[in-house]
């Protein structure tokens, strides 16, 4: 059993890169503007996971892209310090 499947046996992905490729595929195939939208789409249509659970499965590339999107769209509180969107940062 993969580490992702240990967290949630129904995830069906072996590693964060494999899972992140699915998020990229969703973004492209559904013609979504952002990775944030792709993660929400996945959560609503392909899984029973919360957004917080899904964040654990994303690779660094997608996490960085989501953080950039959130900053550009001003979804984060403004302050002088960098805000970590994910627990392991």
Image: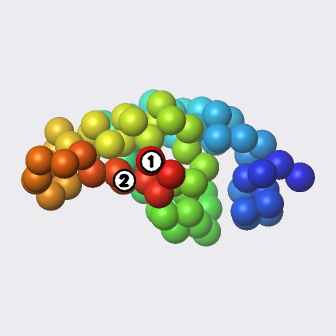
| Residue 8 x/y as whole percent | 73, 64
User: In the picture shown, does residue 35 fall above or below 52?
Assistant: above
x and y percentages locating residue 28 in the rendered image: 45, 31
View extreme (right): residue = 1
Question: Looking at the image, is 37 positioned above or below residue 25?
Answer: below
Q: Residue, x 61% and y 68% (percent of image)?
A: 48
Q: Secondary structure at mark 2?
A: loop
Rendering quarter of residue 67: top left
The residue carrying pointer 2 sits among few (fewer than 14), some (14 to 19) or many (20 or more) residues within 10 Å by Cα, namely: some
Residue 89 is situated, as x and y percent measured from the top left of the image, at 44, 47
41 sits left or right of 77 in the view: right
Label drawn at residue 29: none
Query: What residue is shown at x 83% (from left), y 49% (from top)?
Result: 2
Q: How is the image coloured?
A: rainbow
Q: At x 36% / y 42%, what residue is drawn? A: 66
Return the residue at label 1: 89
Q: Is residue 41 visible?
A: no
- Horizontal arrangement in the rendering, residue 61 relative to residue 56 (left or right): left
Would you say the residues marked 1 and 2 are in contact, meaning their CB atoms lie under 8 Å apart?
Answer: yes
Which quadrant of the figure has residue 64?
Answer: top left
Local secondary structure at mark 1: loop
Q: Is residue 85 visible?
A: yes
Q: Closer to the camera, 81 or 50?
A: 81
Residue 85 circle label? 2
Query: Marks 1 and 2, how far apart in space?
Result: 8 Å
Q: Residue 54 at what x, y percent from top left?
A: 55, 57
For the residues carrying marks 1 and 2, which lies nearer the camera in this image? 1
């Amino acid at each position: 059993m993969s580490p992702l499947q240990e967290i949630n046996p129904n995830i069906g992905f072996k590693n964060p890169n494999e899972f992140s490729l699915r998020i990229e595929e969703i973004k492209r195939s559904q013609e979504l503007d952002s990775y944030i939208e792709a993660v929400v789409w996945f959560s609503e249509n392909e899984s029973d996971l919360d957004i917080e659970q899904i964040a654990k499965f994303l690779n660094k590339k997608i996490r960085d892209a989501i953080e950039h999107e959130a900053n550009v769209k001003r979804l984060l509180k403004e302050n002088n310090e960098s805000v970590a969107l994910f627990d392991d940062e």
